[in-house]
Image (cartoon, grey):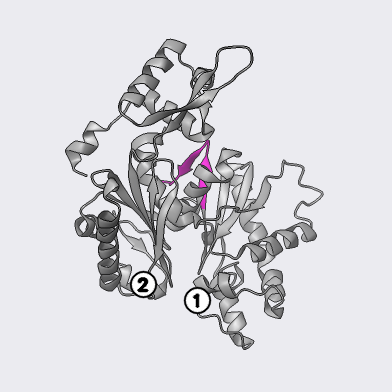
Amino acid sequence: MTNDAMESMKITANERMILDIVRRSKGLARSAITGQTNLTQQSVHRIVDRLLELEYLQLGDSVVQGRGQPSRAVNLAPNAFFSIGVSLNTDVMLVCLVNFNGEILVQESIPFAPVNRQETQTWLRALVIKWQQEYPFIEGRIIGLGFAMTGYFVKQKGHIRPPDPLSDWAGIDLEHELNHLLNMPVILLNNATTGAIGEAFHGAGLTYQTFGYLSFDFGFGGGIVIDGEPFFGAFGNAGEIGRIYTSDEIPKRPALAILLEMLASNGIYVPSVARLNDDFDSDWPVVAEWIQLTTPHLLRAINALRSVIDPSAIVLGGQIPKPLARMLLAALEQQGVKSPQDISVWPKVMVSELKDDSAVLGAALQPLRNMFFRK
């Protein structure tokens, strides 16, 4: 999509507000939209009419509300726009295509470890071209690509310092390189933050406006959502909760790489974090040992988020197998997470219930957020 085409799609703050209300409500009666805004009924009707004319919205079935006349439901038009998301981890890269509703239409994972940057980018470019050929209805409607990877941003724009297995991805302006390679706008993100974005759109964020997201991957990181908006910080590193640990504590933090090392030391070989979901067995003796080792440090991370952002919820997500996340949650409860001296309100701590990978979903959603839903 050209810059001129992107410019022509710009919408007002009130139009964004209406789109976001419709997105959250899923089939909201047209007559009920005004009550969720600070606008007059006439203004809302005018905005909805324009968004219908632009084909950003579409009308659904009639909705009966009380004694009044039925009103047509309003929905996002799913094929209005599309976006691509990429989540790069140490041992796997996922790519997905989402529609305007933020629904994943197709998803693929790279068939080899994405440690070689040029090889991986060649595969990614070929995949995007293949999708454009297989799904002609997306032609001219892809507004951009969100590229999320594990690591933290360094001083230079477009640079991320990844973990050692991805060292080939360090030291370059990756955002610029991908923009040129794919010939579309690219947003470079941390995948713990995009995990939080995925939750904000389709998970915990539909109930909790301010929450922390803890991402259990090769390492251990986090993302933050405040009043419904992801918080990036000055350099894109907000939520990098692993920074609270000393060098002596790093081997005890709840990183899945440490679990893999412990399993290997006990004769159980799991080749990658990605394979852990398929191979995980809660009866492995090492699992209980890892939980006992890491739970106090997980509690420190939770308390750090509580003290800084006062969240209403904290979500356990990332690449961690859901049965293992639930075991961690049970361990927190058994430890008695609240001391007698702590009389503050405790947030809801929960395991992510998203079926799709939250990080790749959030990466795909970010271009849509920036263009149509961001406040």
Asked whether, in this view, residue 296 is left or right of residue 372, the answer is right
Residue shown at the point (25%, 68%) measured from the top left: 122
Distance, label 2 to label 1, CA atoms, is 12 Å
21, 254: nearer the viewer: 21
Residue shown at the point (68%, 46%) measured from the top left: 348
Q: Which mark is residue 114?
A: 2
Q: How many neighbours does mark 2 have within 10 angstroms: few (below 14), some (14-19), or many (20 or more)?
A: many
Q: Is residue 343 above or below residue 161?
A: above
Query: From this viewpoint, which residue is outermost toward the bottom?
Result: 267
Q: Earlier in the sequence, mark 2 or mark 1?
A: 2
Asked whether, in this view, residue 331 is left or right of residue 19, the answer is right
Look at mark 1 in the image and give the residue it sits on: 272
Quarter holding residue 80: top left
The magenta segment: 223-237
Which amino acid, by three-letter code, is at mark 2? Pro
Which amino acid, by three-letter code, is at mark 1? Ser
